[in-house]
Image: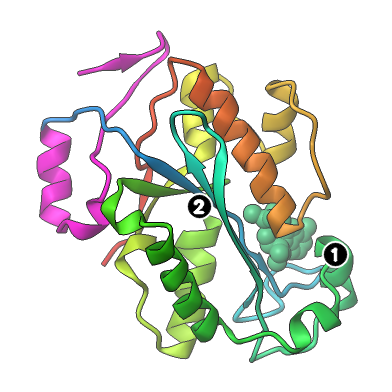
Amino acid sequence: MHMAGKRLCHLFIPARTHLRSKSSFSRTNDSPRRHHFDRLLVLDFEATCDSKRGTIRPQEIIEFPVLNVETNSFEIVGTFHRYVKPEVHPTLTPFCTSLTGIIQDMVEDEAPLKTVMEDFHKWLLSQDLFNKEFAFVTCGDWDLKELLPRQFLHTGQVIPAYFKSWINIKMIFAESTGVYPRNLPHMLSHANLVQSGRLHSGIDDCRNIAAVVRFLGLQKNSQWRLTSFLED
Ligand code: AMP
Ligand code: MG
Ligand code: MG
């Protein structure tokens, strides 16, 4: 087994596993190997919310930003950024606006998630990503493990296969630095990176996560691997 750093060992799972069956995951785990991703897609959703977590159900995506990071230079080579109109709870709470900086006018005339998803798929095609090895990178598992599946359950939409596995950057950060980060500001400060923009703006969060991706990517001991999977 390949070892990265002295502290933790890794299972290396190939990219494009969203095209593979569950059984091939276990086959891969039986003989782990390192894999190269051509692109890392940094994603950070913002969603409807209130000060008391759990009072708005389903939470709905209101900001959908994704940065396409090329893994030789770790530069951003493409951006998808849309605000999304929530349909179940169309009016943003004052708490949500003050947390995310997203005001009602920014979502009012935007398309609903179904349309934005279709546009996102077209963007993936336009970036030639289906001919490349790519993986989503998120800060924590909430975006793709909880928010998106719950919203899709509510609307009856099918989750595209490519959203069923991803890299939780906190895991890679922990393996590379030996420190398990509490949150994005913790990773930035540990890496001596200056936070850009405002916390809880989806696009600014993505830029800051992309800065951490670059920081880790330029450290030769960082090993990118899928860390999280949706159960079928
Ligand atoms: P984040 O990516 O950390 O900016 O958060 C994503 C989403 O989680 C936000 O758009 C909110 O819907 C929710 N959220 C984050 N922090 C809080 C909080 N302190 N209270 C309630 N909801 C929150
Ligand atoms: Mg987030
Ligand atoms: Mg955010």
Where is residue 97? Give x, y as percent: 86, 70
79 relative to 191, above or below: below
| Residue 108 x %, y % | 77, 87
**In the depicted structure, whether residue 119 falls above or below residue 138:** below
Q: CA distance from mark 1 to mark 2?
A: 23 Å
Residue at the farthest top position = 6
Residue shown at the point (30%, 66%) measured from the top left:
161
Looking at the rendered structure, which numbered label has been put on residue 101?
Answer: 1
Labels 1 and 2 touching (C-beta < 8 A): no
Answer few, some or many: residues within 10 Å of disc 1's Cα (few below 14, many 20 plus, some between 14 and 19). some
Q: Quick one: SS at disc 1?
A: loop
Q: Residue at x 17, y 56 (%)?
A: 20
Report the amino acid beneath label 2: Asp
Assign ligand 2 to one image quadrant: bottom right
Task: Write down the region rendered in magenta.
Answer: 1-30
Q: Residue at x 76, y 57 (%)?
A: 201
- In the displayed structure, 70 sits above or below 175; it is below
Count the marks: 2
Q: Earlier in the sequence, mark 1 or mark 2?
A: 1
Question: Residue 167: which disc?
Answer: none
The location of residue 58, given as percent across then percent down, is 59, 81
- Determine which quarter of the picture holds residue 193: top right
